[in-house]
Image: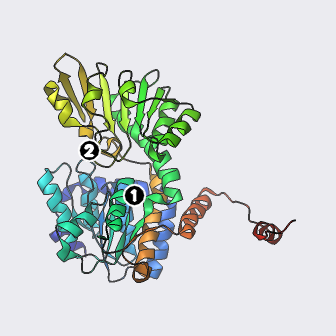
Amino acid sequence: MTTKAIQNSVITDLKLAPEGHLKIDWVEAHMPVLSRIRKQFEQEQPFKGLKVAISLHLEAKTAYLAKVVQAGGAEVTITGSNPLSTQDDVCAALVEDGVTVFAKYNPDPKEYKELMIRALENKPDLIIDDGGDLVSILHSERPDLLENVRGGAEETTTGILRLKAMDKEGQLKFPMVAVNDAYCKYLFDNRYGTGQSVWDGINRTTNLVVAGKTVVVVGYGWCGKGVAMRAKGLGANVIVTEIDAIKAVEAYMDGFHVMPMIEAAKVGDFFVTVTGNRDVIRGEHYDVMKDGAILSNAGHFDVEVNKPELEERSVSVRTVRRNIEEYQLKDGRKMYVLAEGRLVNLAAGDGHPAEIMDMTFALQALSLKYVNERYKEIGATVVNVPYELDEQVARYKLESLGFGIDRLTEEQRAYLDSWQEH
């Protein structure tokens, strides 16, 4: 299988593999839940004889997930889900481990799309998607590759929004498990993972102090909650902008200022978008921003910060530091965009901590097994992760930490199940 992977893969340089192996070994040592599932998969072989295509941010933690799926008997093909988050050394290491890889760091848009299509041309039985790109290509550009697909699992909020739109229109051709909506995903990955990794990316890229600055968090979903919480912990004054009145009240009661974006734009030093929508920072906001404002995005696609409207207002654009573009406006003010407006925590960092992705990728692995076993009865629709799988991952996590929890006695269970007066 290794020879086949080497012959078929499209990567930057196989010689980079030693460094990639070190990265994968490091995260494996800090992902005990996924390692436990790997042992189960090695014994059960749930994917024996099947082909699995994966599109995720291609770094070490994703690589370990690919190896776990491979350990379950699958022939795995993997591609990136963001051109700036792919790590070439990790790609090389995966190829040496027998995984076919179609990914490079920072390919041009045409090649990036072609690499994704190449990953699908293996005609997978199962897919793991991030942002809905594989599903979109299968349904629009390459329906000829749909014939073997039993189902899959989706990683992100953005991807689930796309899937649900397809499902509503009756266009979805196979079942997809909404991994992002699992409790363990949005409570831990979205809040603690995004919260930490966004500031890891911003801090390593800018090397500027956060304490005392004003941070504007655009969107107060689970990712926004994490970003705001960590900004507060770093000593920032935090403003939240929202379109949802309930979330806005929540942000206020969590101790943050709440105001419309047009007002927040006037006072922000750092801006982080986490909405899954487009143009949440746009022309009218640039017109009132302070000189030196730093703009970053933590949503899946690079459409949240409207770069064309920023370019229209600029007389020059230059790269002033790795992953920092400086836009000088006609009136002399300067704005800085991090990581081209792409996911700042991955394009300018290493993504979520390994311990966080341990739980998320455990959900991915178990969800893939679940959809493979039940794809006929599920049908072509979007389904949630079964609670028992969610709870299983949390239980494995507790056990890996050496913690235990209480269990209901029979009397307590009967009390909770009874409607009669006690």
Q: Where is residue 417 in the image (x, y as percent from the top left)?
A: 76, 70
Mark 2 near mark 1, Cβ–Cβ under 8 Å?
no
Q: In this view, does 98 lie above or below 27?
A: below
Q: Name the residue under label 1.
A: 25
Element carrying mark 1: helix
Where residue 132 sits, quadrant-wise, is bottom left
Seen from the viewer's position, the closer of residues 262 and 159 is 262
Give the label on residue 302, or none. Answer: 2
Badge 1 density bin: few <14, some 14–19, many ≥20, Cα 10 Å? some
Q: What residue type is labelled 2?
A: Asp
Residue 221 in sight: yes
Look at 49% across and 75% down and name the residue there.
Answer: 40
The figure's colour scheme reads rainbow
Q: Disc 2 versus disc 1: distance between alpha carbons?
A: 31 Å
At horizontal 30% and vertical 28% (from top left) the residue drawn is 285
Instruction: Give how far across and how far down residue 116 sits, in percent.
Output: 20, 62
Q: Nearer the viewer, residue 79 or 164?
A: 164
Task: Give the number of the disc on residue 169.
Answer: none
Residue 215, relative to residue 196: is it above or below? above
Residue 342, image x, y percentages: 27, 43
Mark closest to the chain's N terminus, 2 or 1: 1
Amino acid on which the number 1 mark rests in the picture: Asp
Tag nearer the camera, 2 or 1: 2
